[in-house]
Image (cartoon, helix red, strand yellow):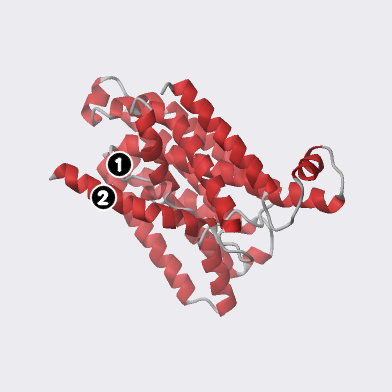
């Protein structure tokens, strides 16, 4: 399948799922009334549901899914590891820990921007540590090991905060947020996260040509004139902005960046640079579909979208490990 045709089909799929996300919900609204309220106005209650509840939810599902899919494709090409995913460098775990600290301190209810600010601060701190350790002279192996260490440390600190939580209600809020969700979000969340995610996507797209050279190995890429340090900086900063900003407003949503590149790779020429846009669109489609599914799987009770993506991604991850083992032996 040609690259342009694949991108067109994925764009149409994302558009269809976006419209479905806007029209599906517990409030039984007619399609025409819903779209009229969204575009031209009308009944006040319908306008509030469409513009203040469903629209930001659909935009965040699209944007966060796109960022996760794009980051997964970039990291799998950069690290030359089919099991790489956005959480491998520790940014999402650090962002989650920053948000958990805000919950624990009680600042989450003091100001709307406190929670995303805490998550972004955690993500920024992890990037500073990564750049200090791995970006200047370190290899990709150093980057992976640093990310694993940061993920483990952030997870341990998050567990510590949960253990020291002063009351069960605070613990419940923390755990519920960590499950990942795009429901009950507003346009303020969109305006916080989207500019940072757009900046991250731009940095990752600039690394596309270098990723094709990286598929030949680090030494070969350096021989072809690829600036190794600059590429590491672009990848780390781009993934940090995309994943950190998304985690700041939705919580941790896993496995999208792992699954999607493997699903779309057979439809491309398998070069890392050609996989970026299809993976981003595939990630948007997957998260939109998962967010639609959580509204209808259990009637009367909505699941967190992070739970659904984990139920999809974990078996897929195990299958990848088994397949890799068979290829090695």
Q: Position of residue 235 (x, y in %)?
A: 40, 36
Residues 245 and 73: in front is 73
Characterize the local packing of mark 2: few (<14), some (14-19) or many (20 or more) Cα atoms within 10 angstroms.
some
Residues 171 and 141: in front is 171
Residue to which mark 2 is pinned: 321
**Residue 114 located left or right of residue 286:** right
Q: Please tell me the numbered disc located at residue 255.
A: none
* Residue at horizontal 33 percent and vertical 45 percent from the top: 84
**Residue 300 located left or right of residue 208:** right
Whether residue 206 is situated above or below residue 317 in the rendered picture: above
* Residue at horizontal 75 percent and vertical 48 percent from the top: 50
Q: Earlier in the sequence, mark 1 or mark 2?
A: 1
Q: Please tell me the numbered disc located at residue 82.
A: 1
Characterize the local packing of mark 1: few (<14), some (14-19) or many (20 or more) Cα atoms within 10 angstroms.
some
Q: Is residue 170 visible?
A: yes
Q: Position of residue 152 (x, y in %)?
A: 35, 60
Q: Position of residue 53 (x, y in %)?
A: 71, 52
Q: Is residue 136 visible?
A: no
* Residue at horizontal 44 percent and vertical 35 percent from the top: 279
Whether residue 260 is situated above or below residue 181 in the rendered picture: above
Quarter of the image where one finds residue 276: top left
Q: CA distance from mark 1 to mark 2?
A: 9 Å
Residues 313 and 173: in front is 313
Q: Secondary structure under badge 1? A: loop
**Residue 220 located left or right of residue 74:** left
* Residue at horizontal 56 percent and vertical 79 percent from the top: 168
Q: In which quadrant is the C terminus drawn?
A: top left
């Amino acid at each position: 399948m040609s690259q342009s045709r694949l991108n067109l089909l994925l764009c149409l799929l994302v558009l269809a799922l976006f419209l479905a996300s806007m029209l599906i919900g517990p409030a039984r609204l007619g399609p025409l009334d819903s779209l009229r309220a969204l575009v031209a106005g009308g009944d006040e209650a319908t306008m509030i549901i469409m513009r203040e509840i469903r629209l930001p939810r659909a935009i965040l599902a699209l944007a966060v899914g796109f960022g996760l899919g794009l980051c997964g494709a970039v990291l799998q090409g950069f690290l030359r590891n089919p099991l790489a995913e956005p959480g491998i460098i520790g940014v999402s775990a650090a962002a989650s820990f920053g948000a958990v600290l805000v919950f624990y301190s009680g600042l989450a209810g003091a100001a709307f921007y406190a929670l995303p600010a805490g998550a972004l601060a955690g993500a920024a701190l992890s990037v500073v540590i990564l750049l200090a350790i791995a970006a200047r002279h370190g290899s990709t192996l150093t980057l992976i090991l640093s990310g694993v260490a940061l993920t483990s440390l952030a997870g341990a600190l998050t567990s510590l905060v949960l253990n020291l939580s002063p009351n069960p209600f605070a613990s419940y809020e923390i755990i519920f947020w960590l499950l990942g969700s795009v429901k009950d979000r507003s346009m303020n969340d969109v305006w916080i996260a989207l500019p940072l995610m757009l900046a991250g996507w731009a940095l990752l797209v600039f690394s596309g040509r270098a990723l094709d050279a990286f598929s030949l190995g680090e030494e070969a890429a350096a021989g072809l004139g690829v600036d190794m340090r600059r590429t590491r900086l672009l990848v780390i900063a781009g993934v940090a902005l995309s994943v950190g900003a998304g985690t700041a407003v939705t919580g941790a949503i896993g496995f999208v960046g792992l699954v999607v590149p493997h699903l779309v790779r057979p439809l491309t020429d398998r070069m890392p640079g050609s996989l970026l846009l299809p993976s981003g669109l595939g990630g948007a489609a997957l998260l939109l579909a998962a967010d639609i599914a959580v509204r209808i799987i259990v009637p009367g009770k909505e699941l967190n979208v992070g739970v659904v993506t984990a139920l999809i991604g974990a078996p897929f991850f195990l299958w990848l490990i088994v397949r890799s083992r068979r290829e090695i032996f």
